[in-house]
Amino acid sequence: MEIEELKKELKKYLKEERYEHSICVMEMSEKIAEIYNVNKMKVMKAALMHDMAKQMPIEKLKKYILDNKIKVSEIEMLLGITLHGKVAADICRKKYGFDDIMCKAISNHTTGRPNMTMFEEIIFIADKIDETRKYEGVQELRALAFKDIDMAIVKNIEYTTKNNLEKGRLILEQSIKTRNYILINKQR
Ligand SMILES: [Fe+2]
Ligand SMILES: [Fe+2]
């Protein structure tokens, strides 16, 4: 399906603000893909649709996960925040014919995972630094993403983790694994 058609589909799922974020993530992913030599069209499609299930009620997401036998950890089920990516990946595969590379990037866009492909890294970071993001340090992170995408991911996870700790929230171990993997293996 072409980008323009996907946009129309996406509008059915998302409210204006989340739709706007999706468009901005798509634009950011295009710029980053250019630098790291990744197929732009595929990255843009995955970026556009990464949050398509974000506004599904949590109970519906959980039901979808169980009905479709999607693998998620206990803590993910408990926290709920990563489920929209898992569901979006499944819908995009079945409904829009997205391939494995695209689906994996959508599925893991919230926490990342150890040993991500460049494609996944682009989706992960574009989501965190798109033009709708306003948190402190986002500009520096944007600049870093264009120079050293691995370190930009590490910095983003550190920022999010710190924030979650300060607020007394649970921490997803998958984020920590993603960060550690990069720090241990960073030498491309
Ligand atoms: Fe998301
Ligand atoms: Fe997002």
Image (cartoon, rainbow, N blue to C red):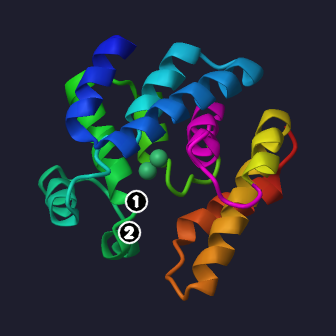
Is residue 173 placed above or below 144 in the rendered structure?
below
Q: Quick one: label 1, few (<14), some, or many (20+) residues within 10 Å?
A: some
Is residue 36 placed above or below 124 in the rendered structure?
above
Find out if the beta carbon at label 2 lies less than 8 Å from the nearest ligand 1 atom: no
Q: Amino acid at mark 1?
A: Thr
Residue, x 79% and y 33% (percent of image)? 146
Q: Are marks 1 and 2 in contact (CB under 8 Å)?
A: yes
Query: Does any portion of residue 97 appear in the rendered image?
Result: no
Q: Earlier in the sequence, mark 1 or mark 2?
A: 2
Instruction: Tell me, yes or no, whether the highlighted magenta stretch contains residue 122.
Output: yes
Instruction: Tell me, yes or no, whether the highlighted magenta stretch contains residue 10.
Output: no
> Percent x, y for residue 10?
28, 31
Q: Quick one: label 2, few (<14), some, or many (20+) residues within 10 Å?
A: some
> What segment carries the magenta color?
117-137
Residue, x 72% and y 52% (percent of image)? 138
Q: Nearer the viewer, residue 46 or 120?
A: 46
Tell me where residue 75 sits by quadrant: bottom left
> Percent x, y for residue 107?
41, 46
Mark 1 — residue? 82
Q: CA distance from mark 1 to mark 2?
A: 6 Å
Q: Amino acid at mark 2?
A: Glu
Residue, x 33% and y 58% (percent of image)? 83
Tell me where residue 132 sits by quadrant: top right
State left or right for residue 6 relative to residue 75. Answer: left
Q: Nearer the viewer, residue 100 or 11?
A: 11
Q: Quadrant of the C terminus?
A: top right
Mark 2 — residue? 76
